[in-house]
Amino acid sequence: MTTETLIWLIPLPPVLAFFIIVLFTNRSKALSHTLAVGAAFLSWLGSMVVFFRAIGTEHLGEHPFVSSIPWLATGDDYLWIGVQIDPLSAVTLFFVAWTVLMIFVYSVGYHNFGQPKGDHDRPGLQPHGATVADAHGHKHTVPSIEPMYSRFFAFIGLFAFGMYTLVVSDNLLTLFVGWEIMGLCSYLLIGFWYGKPSARAAMIKAFITTRVGDVFMLLGIAYLYTMTGTLNYREIFYNPEVLNYLVETPSYIAGLSAAAMIGILLFLGTIGKSAQWPLHVWLPDAMEGPTPVSAMIHAATMVSAGVYMVIRVFPLLSAGFENGQLTPPMLLMAFIGAFTALFSATIAVAQNDIKRVLAYSTISQLGFMIAALGVGGYVAATFHLVTHAFFKALLFLGSGSVIHGVEHGVLHTGDHHMDPQDMRNMGGLRHKMPVTFWTFTIGGLALAGFPLFTAGFWSKDEIFADAWAHAPIVLLVLGLAALLTAFYTSRQITMTFMGKPRTKEAEHAVESKWTMTVPLVILAVFAVAFGWVGIPHEFPVVGGIIPNWFHEFVGATLLEHPETLPFSWIPLLTSLVVSLFGLWLGWQVYKGFQVGSTDPVEKTLGATVYRWLKNKYYFDELYDKVFVKPAYWLAETFTSLWMDRKVIDGVLHWFAHISGIIGNFLRNAIDKPIVNGSADLIAESTKRLGAVFRTIQTGRVQQYMILALVSIAAFSALFYYLLVAAR
């Protein structure tokens, strides 16, 4: 099979699994998850074949695997759709395939592990029919897995299809199709337990917030097509004549070229999809969905798609960057990315929900990638996108394993009011859940950028190097964000796993089953080893031992290969200091933390500052007052009372009045005199004719015989007369 044909087939298994599960196998849970995992495996297998063929192809950046077909007619031409695998999409396909497969496998164990609360308080972590003993020693059988099991695997299959479609597309049109499919799936999966009011609110919040960015992105796509007549990557982003034309053409806004305006509009789509400030508010609430959904959204698909898109259109965003001056889109990205990285990191230090800490960490790490692109760090941003996908998927799946372990303790104690996601209720889990502990720790160290050992260190160091070379102020902001990242990561690991159990539920925690721990181990390997492919040649001691394959391979995607930055001790020392000091500080501050005690961050910063951090700077409340409540007021007051009743109802009543006038005229002028008159005339004539003929219908036989004789005589006389006249 040719590589191009195989690329077309990669997205198909998950979407076929979606339709088969929805239409045929939804009553069989085992068959449904087997289909879903099998589909994910087939896409993984195809992705690996394409990936290894890609890395074995010389000059892939200049001659990528491409195939396209005409799709929609546009007068004399067509909108073409197709597939393309170049170095950027090859490495993206690699991490998407691995993380998606691991999440699918993990989901089987996740939904069959067991939860004492059933579907009354917090549905989702459902038991699988085992017989257990409660706190009083009474044995009972817990309910079977929740009824929407098959629906879950159908939805994540569609989710995977959207991401695969986005990655292999060769144009912005089908990229946007995959983009919107994932938006739909995020809505369905964040609100998967739609019986909970918080889940319903979260899915609506996510859908509406991301739609804000998507509207601007669609405007950018339309503007780009208007200017160039195509949406194909190779025809726009790798064509110097087209890029120069866009740079030299002024836009509708004074001072901005068409390239800058289109770039800003496209980037606004990423602000929504990748949850950058100020559209960041939806991502923490995405925790309302099942943990595998969190991993899909925060690592494998949804938010990665936003960063992937700006990396893909980077030649347009950076058009004009050759003279050393940051372009307007790059300036905007540098500011938004750096601010979001620090802003979200400050919030994460005050969160106690194990998944919510990771949610704000995701927002912050995406800010690192956006800031890197803002300062021209194309390869660094791509490198961190890949490493982050591995260690953040590991952390989210690890958090789900921790929650399951504590849920088992809840089953034994019977205290269903205890929150199994609150880190203050944990502690000492390293002995109860050793596999989860070691893999989660590896992921946490990668997130914190632990020197030399983790992939996160190498990718984050690359970002620091680019920031130091082009915008030192960005390095300062990202350095502070990295310090806080190491601190809250150490805080999370210490509160969750170290010390002694702080609750009885933590004492009874157990390790998760193999379908959950095996994906953790595999992702932990990538969280360490993938960083080795991007070690700079100039790095002290270890540089040059392993070739910097990632820089050479991904950099070939661009027309001009990105320059290799000269080595500098400043970004390296920054990376070392913030990582090690942050990890040490988090351990020192929280190693003696006891349940019920005041958080050390609150003691240090004060109750007021801590309250602001814990409540996310009250952005949700601000948006509620500025946007949500006015929208409801507008709908209820202006729209309902004035627009609906005055304008719409008024127009309808006017039409009804005019229709009545016209109806009366037609009834009096046409209906009554003509239509009714004609019918009445026919009826009256028939009536009179009937009255005449009725007189001869007497029923007397003698009279009928006399009439017959008279008639015969009359006809005979008439016949005789005619016969004589004829002679």
Image (cartoon, grey):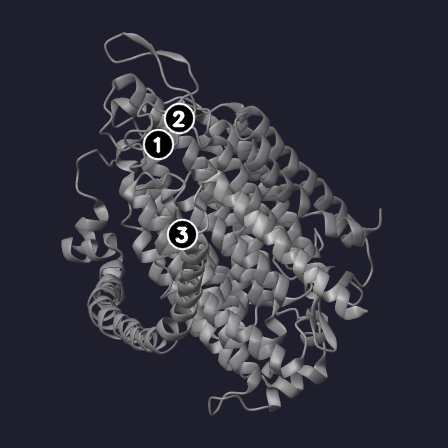
Image check: 153 left or right of 379?
left
Which kind of residue does numbered mark 1 sit on? Pro
The residue that mark 1 highlights is: 123
Quadrant the C terminus occupies: bottom right
Within the image, what quadrant is residue 414 found in? top left
Q: Is residue 31 visible?
A: yes
**How many C-alpha atoms fall within 10 Å of the one at disc 2: few (<14), some, or many (≥20)?**
many
Question: What mark, if any, has residue 126 been given in the picture?
Answer: 2
In this picture, is 7 found above or below 314?
A: above
Direction from residue 714 to residue 357 in the image, left or right = left
Distance in Å between CA atoms under marks 1 and 2 = 7 Å
Total marks shown come to 3
- Residue holding disc 3: 361
Residue drawn where x is 20% and y is 52% of the image: 604
Q: CA distance from mark 1 to mark 3?
A: 26 Å
Would you say the residues marked 1 and 2 are in contact, meaning their CB atoms lie under 8 Å apart?
yes
Q: In which image quadrant can residue 655 be found? A: bottom left
Residue type at mark 3? Ser
Q: Secondary structure at mark 3?
A: helix
Quadrant for residue 620, please give it.
bottom left
